Amino acid sequence: SYELTQPPSVSVSPGQTARITCSGDALPKKYAYWYQQKSGQAPVLVIYEDSKRPSGIPERFSGSSSGTMATLTISGAQVEDEADYYCYSTDSSGNHREVFGGGTKLTVL
Amino acid sequence: EVQLVESGGGLVQPGGSLRLSCAASGFTFSSYWMSWVRQAPGKGLEWVANIKQDGSEKYYVDSVKGRFTISRDNAKNSLYLQMNSLRAEDTAVYYCARDDFTKGKDYWGQGTLVTVSS
């Protein structure tokens, strides 16, 4: 079965740049999406189609993808950015499988 | 304003059934694929199923195939998940989400908790 792999945790100080990676064999062919989930809340889309930012998402959030790895970058991370972040994509084999990464807990302190 | 409101969760015994509903508003429901995504306590997100605009295509994660059925009623702007033969490992918060062609799952409901326990 298809998997997306994320580091379990990333920690930065306020104002530093946080980078969260997501690796998957189909990422060269399929877009990556990123979701932010704060404790007790529903997920929120922060990046779609590898690098596009929905309206209302701060400019400090950006995304990129190269080969089998997608990266979410938070430039100048704020305390309010502390959350779980999930990448999402689809299998390229044509079997319509959708997959989330295991999630990365971002700590900003 | 796009709104998705789930209902129907609760406590059910192993082997039992439950039907979840998701009421959609603020957009043309019949124009979008829709999905169910779940999250077990303390765990990550897991895609469960999705359904095409007219209900003609449905896809499931392997672990629920043959037990869960996704459906929709475009006249009622509603999405459903019929869950049969429930297992302890189905315990989770179940979210409905709108599937946008470019933005992916761009709107989510607040979720409904399903607990499978004796």
Image: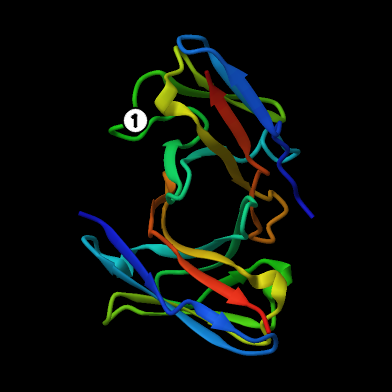
In the rendered image, residue B66, in percent from the top left (x then y), is placed at 69, 83
Q: Is residue B79 above or below residue A59?
A: below
In the rendered image, residue B101, in percent from the top left (x then y), is placed at 42, 51
What residue do we see at 69% from left, 85% from top? B14
SS category of the residue bearing label 1: loop
Of residues A60 and B87, the one nearer the viewer is B87
In the rendered image, residue A107, in percent from the top left (x then y), is placed at 56, 25
What residue do we see at 76% from left, 38% from top? A25
What residue do we see at 45% from left, 9% from top? A15
Amino acid tagged 1: Ile
What residue do we see at 52% from left, 39% from top? A33
**Subunit that carries the residue with mark 1:** A
Q: Check disc 1 and report the residue beneath it.
A: A57
Where, by quadrant of the figure, is residue B85 drawn?
Answer: bottom right
In the rendered image, residue B76, in percent from the top left (x then y), is placed at 27, 81
Of residues B66 and A13, the one nearer the viewer is A13
Q: Which quarter shows the N terminus of chain A?
A: bottom right
A60 horizontally vs A84: left or right: left
